[in-house]
Amino acid sequence: MDKNTKKGLITGFFGIIFVGLQPIIAISRPTAVDAYLSGAMTCMVEALIFFPILLFEFRILNSHNQKANKLLKNVNKVHVLSNWKKNFWLLIGIGLIFGVNQVFFFIGYDMAGAINGSLAQKTTVFFSIILGYLILKERITKLQIFFSILLFLGLAISITQFFTLIDINLTILIGVGIILLISLMWIFGHTLTKPLFNREEATPIQMVFIRNIISGVILILTYLIIFTPDFKIFFDPDNLSFFFLMGAVYGAGLICWYKTLSYLDVSKATTIFAPTPISSAIYATILLGENFTLAHLLGTILIVISIIIIVNQKRN
């Protein structure tokens, strides 16, 4: 096993831990904090986390330019800002998409539960091949179609507990539907950013910071206008702890994802992150008292296998 593979496995392992924790913390938020404010503050804390990383990236890029030509000392920073300005409305749209998504994240998990929700969120791989085909003109294979059907079969088995049609919880079904929607929107947002990466007009670190700062500002401003809250809610110790914990765990998951991508290709990184529903299920069982059933286990196995096949087909 080469050095990069080992590093990728290590960062991927920690990524599974952090991503698996996200639904648990979301569901455990203080009763005084609604989904709207939770989404807003999560975005702002993520932006704060990625801001020093962004500055560090600027420093590295600028250093490379200095080595290439001392006369180009400040061109890199100006170039980055000009690219952001050129794509201003696209970035606003992406920020809005991810902002709405962050609010729906809390609503969906509240209704679906941590186990069902984490399984539903793995459908992002299906939406990635569909939007890749529609927007980026990427090819879809028959094997991907088959395993996409198998993926949804695994999800259906988990949600309905082996298709038990009696006493299906409507709240869970609506919650799963919301998470399917945010999975679609999440991939749609990433599909819109891919051309920026291809044209080297933004980096993943820059995009995470931009989208979160835009999302956070939009959500907080609209929250203050619509709900006119008591400002004490922002400074309550329990609420502050939740804001920083949720943002830190979400941000740590993203950092682990991008670090894993820096060591491995997308298909291998996605494969490593595929078992995140298992970590969520362990946390949910221990911390939230949710019941991980045989149907959940079978559904998880089908979903993980489907993800591995689909992403490897996409790479090929």
Image (cartoon, helix red, strand yellow):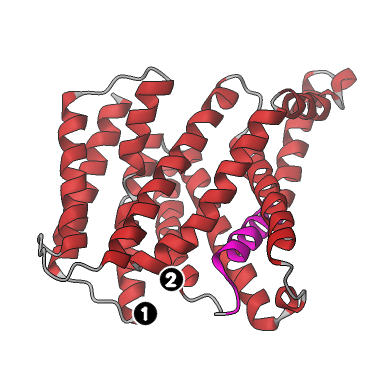
Identify which residue is drawn at 22% across, 53% down: 155
Quarter of the picture holding the N terminus: top left
Q: Is residue 45 magenta?
A: yes
Q: Is residue 35 magenta?
A: yes
Residue 33 visible from this viewpoint: yes
Q: Determine which of the numbered discs, if any, sits on residue 24 in the image.
A: 2
- Can you give x and y, in whole percent of width and height, for residue 63 in the image? 78, 32
Q: Quadrant of residue 301?
A: bottom left
Quarter of the picture holding the C terminus: top left
Q: How many marks?
A: 2
Answer left or right for 190 relative to 172: right
- Can you give x and y, in whole percent of width and height, for residue 74 in the image? 87, 27
Main secondary-structure element of the magenta-colored stretch: helix
- Can you give x and y, in whole percent of width and height, for residue 224 in the image? 74, 62
The vertical placement of 58 against 238, above or below, is: above
Query: Mark 2 packing: few (<14 Cα in 10 Å), some, or many (20+)?
Result: many
Q: Nearer the viewer, residue 74 or 93?
A: 93
Q: Nearer the viewer, residue 270 or 7?
A: 270
Identify which residue is drawn at 46% across, 41% down: 185
Mark 2 near mark 1, Cβ–Cβ under 8 Å?
yes
Dot 1: what SS?
Answer: helix
Residue stretch in magenta: 32-50
The vertical placement of 109 against 156, above or below, is: below
- Tell me which label, 2 or 1, sits earlier in the chain: 2
Identify which residue is drawn at 71% across, 81% down: 236
Query: Mark 1 packing: few (<14 Cα in 10 Å), some, or many (20+)?
Result: some
Residue 1 visible from this viewpoint: no
Rounded to the nearest whole Å, what is the CA distance between mark 2 and mark 1? 8 Å
Q: Determine which of the numbered discs, if any, sits on residue 279 in the image.
A: none
The amino acid at mark 1 is Leu
